[in-house]
Amino acid sequence: MITQTVEQLPPGKSTPDFTRKPIAVTVQEGKKTFFKAMVSGEPAPTVTWGRNKGEIDDPEKYKTRYDERAREHILEIININPDQADTYKCFATNEYGKAVCTTTLNVISQGGKKAYFNMKCVVVTRKKQLPPQKEGEIDPKLWELLISAPKKDYEKICLEFGVTDFRWMLKRLNQMKKERADEQAKVVEQLENVKQIEVKPNGKAEFGFDMQLWDPNSAVNLYKDGVMVPYADDENSKHSLRKKGTNYIFSIKDPQPEDAGFYQVDVEEANVLTTDFRVPAVEFVDKIKDAKAVESEDAVFQCVLSTPLNRITWSREDSSLEHGDKYEITVSEDKLTHTLRVKDCEIADKGAYYAIAGIASSRASLMVEEDPHGRKGRKGTKTIGHDNLSNQGLDKAKISKEKDDLEAVNRALAEKKAANTLGDAKDGGDGRDGLGAGDDRGVQFVSGLSDTNANIGERVEMSCKLSSETSEGHWYKNGKLLTNEDGVTIIKDGAFHRLIVDCCKKDDAAVYRFEAEGRKSEATLNPPKMDPDALGNFTKPVIIKAGENAEWKLPFSGQAPMTIQWYKNDDELLPALNVKIETSDSESQLRLIKCQRKDSGEVKIKIKNEFGTTEAISKLIVLDKPTPPQGPVDIMESAVTSVEFKWKPPKDNGGCPIANYIIERQQVGRNKWTSLGEIPGNSPSFKDSDVDPGRRYCYRIRAKTAEGISDYLQTEDIPAGVLRYPGPPAVPKVVSAFKDCINLAWSPPCDTGGTKIVGYNLEKNKKGTNYWSLVNQKGPITDTKYAVKDVFEGAAYEFRVSAVNLSGAGDPSIPCDTVIARDPMIKPRFKDRNMKTFVVVKSGNTVRLNINFEASPMPEIFWLKDGIPVPKHVTITNSDKGSQLLIPTSERTDTGIYTITVKNMVGQESFNVEIRVTDDPKPPGPVELEQNIPGTVTLSWTPSPDEKRDDRLHYMVSKRDSFKRTWRTVADNLFNNKFTVVNILPGRQYHFRVFAKNDMGLSPHSESPFQVNRPEIKHRIFDSPPSFIVPLKRRTAPQGYECYMSCAIKGDPAPRVTWYWNNISLNTNTNYHITNVCGVCSLLILRVGPKDNGEYKVAIQNKLGTAESSMMLNVRGIHKV
């Protein structure tokens, strides 16, 4: 909303407005967030913030600032709590108004169930839903998945939606990807390595990407089926985000069927990832089994599912496996049997392998033995276990039978659950439900306890989930019952049971157990611990010089027995001559003897007991002199006067930056090496400018650091060039020529002389002399064009150019054509298209005419008044671009047509301006009335004194009667002193006024001395021939103005009136306005021109006779130049 506080804004000022409004934010409790706004207005508005409920003046909770670089006004809210959920306002104010906009802050509580807004619980924010799938069209979810997926996953994703041929979709998909990238570019600087959701061997479902944000404080939101899902950075949470640098990994702990859904990640309003988590109802009828193979043999893992699936996930501990050269993944026709073949087994292939179908998984190990006979090329196959699948008796019939048995069990369980829901307790009271006695399992663990790692002082939470929300349970620590009085917090939330230790201590390390209705689940909490101060010192890099010893020492604590292992660059260190390891119950020490540069790298200690594992990492940096610079040496230039070459920096700088390179030179054929000095280490190149043409040289290059000087890199023989001059360039071309400058351009020579062209020499010769002078006295011209300014106006010149290379200047080119230093020839023309042709000036005022023109060479300028030179009191000022006419104090005699003529050797151009000097008109003399014809009154008056001095002076007549009592103009543009007023009605009183009028305006009026009061007259009928009461009079009219002619006639019957011009009838000519009102005949010419000169005649005729009246019209202002 914008409020303006003034009625009218001054020019250049404006009320405040928002060019970018703050957007609504949803954030988790304990985090911080920002509101950002951009405003406009003149003067610059003052920006303040507020909220509906409460103040924002607490600096520990709210901070406001202005970012000048981004031009953003920022409100920062620190350590958000649910009380701060509210509607926030931003005010922009200046002296002309005020602008207000609002936004909302939603807070998600630590429990992750509710979002608080305005101190009330509200539903978690929803994302805009995808449109429903229309019949015969592609599911919108498929489009969203393909936008986020890499190309290699297109086929797999399309098969899950029943699309077998997706090639026709690629064009639209590429357009949608481009639009999505444009949206993401507003908030994301870089997005790559997008990974779809997968269940990992650790039991978590993970998906993620590498992302770099423009604003690190941008909100990253997770949605499931359009509903925002709260997440934490604690890996023990149900939904968590693990962020390391630019890598984002979202995890779903202990995924269940209810976790299946359509997951999306948004940054602000831009979607960056979409993935579909499906949890099929599938189990392993036959799991994968341990396998053993000899090097170079193939190993096969095979499993059988209860439900057909297109694909399952094969994985190792740290990565998923894809079909390719190393791994062959196949599926049977019935989609039940899935096989993984590990080709050409190596020792590195040993370890655990996982088959993951939905949320079910199967694990087996692969043992790879060295080939005792050394036959690396031998090929063979070892399948699951020590025998293949057929030897284990798992033939097709057995697999099918096990699958049928499993389906029967599932159906029986489903029937029993339905019966329990209906409340029929008696039917199942004896524990028999068709599956055999004792098969009623009661309450079950949906998810059990997990071993937990924690540091001293941290908050620890252990949780499990039962199949029943009504079941109660108990917690035990090392077999002892726990209650809330034992320093722990016990929470029951439906089927979830939690045990929380707020501040972990050493004695909290134990075995924890939860029991419910005879069911148990155990987990341990007792990882090895490291002293924080010692750990901080351990992680600092150890920097030594070559030949010195390196030592690490780290205290630890934890329950025995402990296993201590040291690693360097991921290779385990064992005691040796140069490796000393000493370990006690509380400390371990590593010493590396006489370290060399190659020993640099990562040093890691791993401490493990039965309750967990912890690691610490340090770094070893061994400083030494650098290795020699790297070749080959590239020759960049081999010229007459210089040799230039470059090389590559040392492969290993010895741990210190290269400070300098030391250069030595030897002339081939001599034994002496000469030092050329040192050059900076940031530029591995050198130019030797002290060489003799045709000789050969050899160079040595050494790298120098703070730790010493490297061995040298020696170049091959490098020859210096011989003297060879370039050929002549092309003939110079004259681009343009002026009186003080001549612009030239030329092309490089075809023959450069074997080296690069360093510039050009330009010479000039003044016509009539034999002397060529150098133009570029300050050095060669580096460009192929030049502006020569050392010229004399009107002089003729020739120019030639020669190229210069490292050997010197070559032969000059052929001279160019003779060019004269003068401005280009331009015919005079006037530049202003809107110049005035008529100017009216009041007598006594200044007259100033500015006429701009363009002409070259400088033209002659003439001013004329009415065809003769202007008077002496008129001042003329000329320049090369225009002329000014000035009359300081104008008089009536200055009226006339002024003509300017601009003339040079190319041509001439003229322009006319009419100047009229006049003054306010004086009023006419007394007005007299004469009544000759019934219904008319003829007015006559004495001319205005200005009539003789102003030929454009005319008169205007106004009338007022006793009925309307308002003045109305009855005639205008009268150039005589008499006018007949018609339509005079009997019985009314009339008053008349006459005004003199010219280009300056109206004079005071002259009023009739008496009023007209016409009595009613009895009409008499009589016939009379036509005659003129007032004939036409001779007229002189100014060119371009109106011309009005009139006469008064009588006759009975009313005569027919015809107007003629030079005996040509005008009655049908639309260029003339002809009227006949009550015997007053008039003709109006709107704009008089030269063609209107001539004789005008009025002929009147009735049955009793005819009459004529004529006049001559002269148009004033026609001149021939």
Image (cartoon, rainbow, N blue to C red):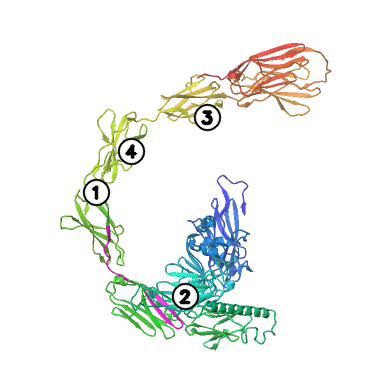
Label 4's element?
loop
Instruction: Specify the amino acid type for callout 1.
Output: Ala
Query: Which residue is at the front of the view, 501 or 783?
Result: 783
- Range of residues picked out in magenta: 603-632
Q: Residues within 10 Å of mark 1 (few under 14, many from 20)?
A: many
Instruction: Specify the amino acid type for callout 4.
Output: Trp
Question: Which residue corresponds to mark 3?
Answer: 835
- The percent coordinates of residue 75 (x first, y second) are 54, 62
> What is the chief secondary structure element of the magenta stretch?
strand
Residue 296 sits in quarter: bottom left
Q: Is residue 310 visible?
A: yes
First in residue order: circle 4 vs circle 2: 2
Query: Which residue is at the front of the view, 602 or 883?
Result: 602
- The percent coordinates of residue 201 (x first, y second) are 49, 74
Vertical placement of residue 990 versus 13, above or below: above
Question: Which residue corresponds to mark 4?
Answer: 746
Question: Which residue corresponds to mark 2?
Answer: 301
Q: Is residue 250 visible?
A: no
Instruction: Say if the magenta span includes residue 616.
Output: yes
